[in-house]
Image (spheres, rainbow, N blue to C red):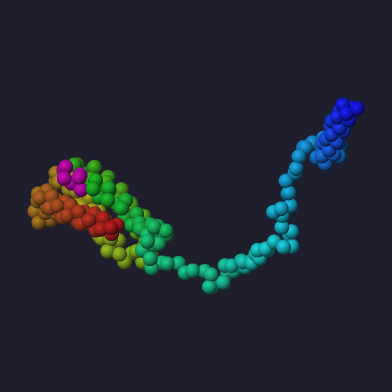
Amino acid sequence: MAKYKFWFGILLIAMLASSAQICFAKDKLPVEGKGYIGTLPDLTRDYVPEEKQDKVQVIPTPAKDFNSEGEIKPVPDDNPTFVNIILKPDKTSKYTADLMEFIPLLENIFDLIEEDKNVQFFNAKVFYFNKSVDYFRDKYADKPESEYLTYKKLMELNIHARSIALLRSEAAKYNPYLAYGSEGYIYNPNNIEEQLGFLKTEIEQTILLIRESNE
């Protein structure tokens, strides 16, 4: 009898343990028996309701009125950096650019005198120079540039060059028939050579004056 009581007690303890495990498992299973089995984290632990959060007030910045005199800064035209770099002025005026085109023409005439070229070559260069000066004069005659020293010097040089070109043409034409007396002296080769020397000096002075005007 005692033996049966012993086994009966063992069976009762086993049944109670099994019942406790089943109850404990039911607390962990989801409703439909699927998904994660265990303790879920508390997702609301760090949650702060919206009405309790600190609100950052955004202050709108009014748009600037760029038509206002207070918002428009004056151009720093007294600042050399702004004037020379930002504005980048064109230092070469149209008048000066036109003047510079005369330099190669004058240098050609000078070289012809130096090389003692014949009258035809010389007169052809002087003719072209004269036409260029006529165009230049028509362009600036009624403008303030006509008072510039370079303008006046160019006009004087043109007259001088034309007069010598004419003198050389007449000398070549009349020399065979002239005895260099008082009336024919102007056609004398020595006189023409002297006049060409004066012209060379005047050409050099004019070229120098033109170059200085561009500095």
* Residue 90 figure quarter: bottom left
Q: Nearer the viewer, residue 46 or 40?
A: 40
Quadrant containing the N terminus in the rendered view: top right
What secondary structure characterizes most of the magenta part?
helix
* Residue 69 figure quarter: bottom right
Q: Residue at x 17, y 55 (%)?
A: 201
**Could you say where residue 21 lies in the image, as x and y percent from the top left?**
82, 36
Q: Is residue 17 left or right of residue 124?
A: right
**Could you say where residue 39 lies in the image, as x and y percent from the top left?**
75, 42
**Could you say where residue 79 lies in the image, as x and y percent from the top left?**
38, 66
Residue 47 visible in the displayed image: yes
Quadrant containing the C terminus in the rendered view: bottom left
The stretch of residues the image draws in magenta is 110-116
In the displayed orientation, state which residue is furthest to the right.
Answer: 1
Please tell me how many numbered marks the rendered image carries.
0
Q: Nearer the viewer, residue 139 or 91?
A: 91
Q: Is residue 139 magenta?
A: no
Q: Nearer the viewer, residue 59 or 177?
A: 59
Q: Is residue 112 magenta?
A: yes
**Could you say where residue 42 lies in the image, as x and y percent from the top left?**
73, 49
In the displayed orientation, state which residue is furthest to the front.
Answer: 1
Q: Is residue 71 left or right of residue 5?
A: left
Q: Is residue 65 above or below residue 177?
A: below
Residue 22 visible in the displayed image: no
Q: Is residue 109 above or below residue 215?
A: above
Q: Residue at x 79, y 36 (%)?
A: 35
Q: Is residue 171 left or right of residue 97?
A: left
Q: Residue at x 22, y 50 (%)?
A: 165
Q: Residue at x 71, y 57 (%)?
A: 48
